[in-house]
Amino acid sequence: MDKRGLGRGLNALLVGTAAEDVARNVREIRLDSIAPNPMQPRTHFDDGSLSELAQSIREHGVLQPVVVRRLATDRYELIVGERRLRASRLAGRTTIPAVVQECSDRDMLLLALIENIQREDIGPVEQARAYQRMASDFGMTQDEIAKSVGKSRQAVGNAMRLLALPDAILGALEAGRITEGHARLLVPLEPAMQMAALDAFVSRSLSVREAEAVVRNLRRGESGGRGAAPSRLEPADPNLASLEDQLSLTLGTKVKVRSSSDGGGAVTIEFYSPEQLEGIVERILRQP
């Protein structure tokens, strides 16, 4: 399958004329003959949502076929359609309409990811882990991932950077205790500051805007609490601290701004991998 076509999504696979449907061999396949997709990037399925879909299937049937690939005679493996498959079982069906499609392992993962992204209900951590799997298992660059799923390179890079956060923070994000916006604020911080900020976000039920103020205060405290001897570069004043925060959020990494007595100063931008550096440079060059 040509990766360039994947950004258009599943419609390119499933929508067509009646003749095309026949050519693609849409058929009723027994549910017990379909194995789950071992590359399914989604790990959580809401029980309430599945129950609603099951009720719809009882009343109207399965409106869109699942996509499978053949393993052996009368044995198949799911490519996309996990929710429809699960809901069909809940609805008491024994068969489901399916399209039999030739598919490599690489495309199987990509198609499963695209299906979930297009439904816009996959969690940010699951999405980031799926992107990371595409990079580690298949050697794809962020550019290739972005083109395959119809996203910008910046969106893919921002998602993958969430995986640098500690498990406790990722767990809070998955559980819905914080949002992706909260999590992004924590990426540039030192580990101890990340946990302090997380505690404040959750215990005080802060909005993202309120959380930005907490991060600002924590970073000011970090600047003022160091015991190093004074140097020619003075600690950032409140205006520069605000600028640091804006730059950190824009670039997705820790940025330090220091001024000197003669009106000059220095801006330090941290990065932790060559790909992150490329992303930072791209974002800087794109600014008007």
Image (cartoon, rainbow, N blue to C red):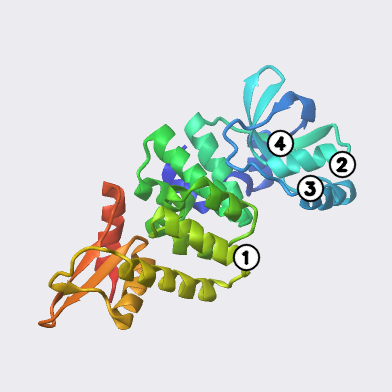
Say which residue label 2 marks.
91
Q: Is residue 22 left or right of residue 270?
A: right
Where residue 68 sits: x, y (%)? 64, 32
Among numbered discs 4 and 3, the one appearing first in the sequence: 3
Q: Can you tell which of label 2 and label 1 is closer to the viewer?
A: 1
Say which residue label 4 marks.
98
Vertical comparison of 180 with 31: above or below: below
Residues at marks 2 and 4, CA–CA distance in whole angstroms: 17 Å
Among numbered discs 2 and 4, the one appearing first in the sequence: 2
Among numbered discs 2 and 1, the one appearing first in the sequence: 2
Query: Please, which residue is most extreme toward the top here?
Result: 73
Where residue 6 sits: x, y (%)? 49, 47
Vertical comparison of 177 with 3: above or below: below
Task: Please name the residue shown 62% across and 70% down the image.
Answer: 204
Of residue 28 and residue 204, the one placed in the foreground of this image is: 204
Vertical comparison of 267 with 26: above or below: below
Hey, what amino acid is under mark 2?
A: Ala
| Res. 223 visible in picture | yes
Hey, what amino acid is under mark 3?
A: Asp
Say which residue label 3 marks.
47
Vertical comparison of 254 with 65: above or below: below
